[in-house]
Image (cartoon, rainbow, N blue to C red):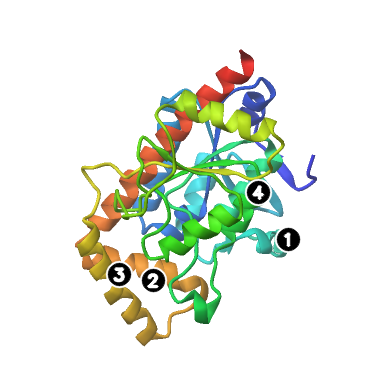
Amino acid sequence: MNPYLEIRPEVATALEHGGSVVALESTVISHGLPRPHNLETARMMEAEVRKQGAVPATVGLLNGRLIVGLSSQEIELFANAEGVHKVSRRDLSTVLKTRKPGATTVAATVWVASQAGITVFATGGIGGVHRGVQETLDISADLTELARTPVAVVCSGAKIILDLPRTLELLETLGVPVVGYRTSSFPAFYVRESGLDLDLRVESPEEAARLMSVQWELGLSSGIVFCNPPPETSALHRTETESLIEAALASAKSAGIKDKTVTPYLLSYLSKSSGGASLKGNIALLIANAGVAGQIAVALSALRKS
């Protein structure tokens, strides 16, 4: 057991008895959504996981510990506190040393979940290869973490602000299966279809669970990306969204925005430019992905007990 790992009782009990657990990240609470939507969404995601019969385990760093299963009060702290560190894999030891609050990204959450024995994780969209990578070499740590950590991530593809063709190509190179959940098109976060086809597809939680089981029984160490398109009622139009992104990228460049601040800036710009439609879509897909992840976790638990 990792000496820095603290698995809260409800999560620990579920894991001990082969129950269904879904990991959730905390960066979306501290950095991904504006107040008060961040707290409301975090609670709705946990409620959606429970609705499917699974236990939610929101991950974060507190008091020098890796917490798996943040309490309601702790989630509220992450939603309202100023200066919460954004923690990827490389930042874990640094932030743990300070004992200050740290919100885990996809990469960090995947790693912590694996340490705890959790194999299903729900998020909005994974990171990937950034546009202009030829000059910046900016590639999300999410991709390399998925290549070496056996956790299934339920998401709405990758964020549309990224270079999606290169993101898919790199995932293939890294040996990470990218699987459509009832779709054959790679979703682009707010957008249901990016125009990029997927070779792999599953139709049910049970089929997803069987794929996970075979993947890891083979001894393959990589994770799996399950792509769940955003709900039709809140999805954005692809062409219009691409136009907004081009404007957002130009604005970020003009303002000198770079590094970790780029993605939050672009998402904020899109929210304002779309009249709040992108924010509504973001919240809807987060909740939908939590529900699918809960269903897959329940199916995986049943398969392991059969």
Q: Earlier in the sequence, mark 1 or mark 3?
A: 1
Q: Which residue is mark 4?
A: 111
Q: Which residue is mark 2?
A: 265
- Judged from the image, the secondary structure of the residue bearing numbered disc 2 is helix
Does the residue at mark 2 contact the one at mark 3 (Cβ under 8 Å)? Answer: no
Q: Residue furthest top?
A: 306
- Judged from the image, the secondary structure of the residue bearing numbered disc 1 is helix
Residue shown at 65%/49% (left/top)? Answer: 111
Q: Is residue 149 visible?
A: yes
Q: Is residue 102 visible?
A: no
Residue 78 position (above or below residue 222): below
Q: Which residue is mark 1?
A: 93
In the image, is 131 to the left or to the right of 276?
Answer: right
Front in this rendered view, residue 82 or 199: 199
In the image, is 150 to the left or to the right of 136?
Answer: right
Amino acid of disc 2: Tyr
Q: Which mark is residue 152?
A: none
Q: Which residue is mark 3?
A: 245
Amino acid of disc 3: Ile
